[in-house]
Amino acid sequence: MKNLFAACLFTLAGASSFAQSTPTPPSPPKPYQEGSLYLGFGTGLANTSTGYLGIKLDAKVADKVMLGVGAGISSWGGRISFTGSYITKSNWCPMITIARSSGSPNDSIQIDLQTADGKTRKVGMYLDAINTVSLGVQKNWYTPRGNRFYLDLGYCFSMATSSTPFRVADG
């Protein structure tokens, strides 16, 4: 009886060792599959897609083309944006973003300004709506499950028709 128990124990130990030593090949990440959708949030001081805080939806619409739409709150009011990027093998993707920020045409924003004699004075300003175009690159990282993290780097150009896209309410 003891010999039968010992034989079973050694057999199980050997089988479990064999099972642990057999490597299973990792499944490759699934970046940019046809019809892939990526829903996430964006944040940053100068985020051209979502502003300070917002949401973004990206979709692969062709073999090497990703399009996205974003909405959020920026330093210039509410923001909505459209992004297009070209997918590369290196995951450094050139991109263009067109955005519109609503400004604050009906609400005056109070700013403390220092006068020439050193005193502080409150000045009200109205921010006009503004359109911007941003050119840059996007670095993508993928998890084994196909989720994506990215970082945008670029420069934003104002499409304002006037040199001052704001109006001073008082001052």
Image (cartoon, grey):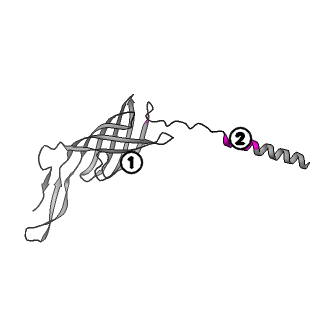
Instruction: Work out whether residue 89 or residue 122 is closer to the camera in this orientation and state it.
Output: 89
Please provide percent x and percent y for residue 81.
29, 42
In this image, 12 relative to 132: left or right?
right
> Label for residue 2?
none
In this image, 81 relative to 125: left or right?
right
Residue farthest top in this picture: 63
- Disc 2: CA contacts within 10 A as few (<14), some (14-19) or many (>=20): few
Residue at (16, 57) in percent of width and height: 125
Please provide percent x and percent y for residue 33.
45, 32
Residue at (69, 41) in percent of width and height: 19
Q: What's the magenta region?
A: 14-36
Instruction: Work out whether residue 80 or residue 116 is closer to the camera in this orientation and state it.
Output: 116
In this image, 145 relative to 159: left or right?
right
Confirm whether the magenta stretch covers residue 5.
Answer: no
| Residue at numbered disc 2 | 18
Residue type at tag 1:
Phe
Residue at (29, 53) in percent of width and height: 45
Please provide percent x and percent y for residue 76.
23, 52
Question: Does dot 1 land on a helix, a strand or a loop?
Answer: strand
Image quarter in which the C terminus is found: bottom left
Question: Does dot 2 land on a helix, a strand or a loop?
Answer: helix
Q: Earlier in the sequence, mark 1 or mark 2?
A: 2
How far apart in space, not on screen, are marks 1 and 2 (Cα)?
44 Å
In this image, 50 relative to 104: left or right?
right
Confirm whether the magenta stretch covers residue 33.
Answer: yes
For residue 120, which quarter of the picture? bottom left
> Label for residue 41?
1
Majority SS type along the magenta span: loop
Give the total of numbered labels.
2
- Mark nearest the camera among 1 and 2 is 2
Residue type at tag 2:
Phe
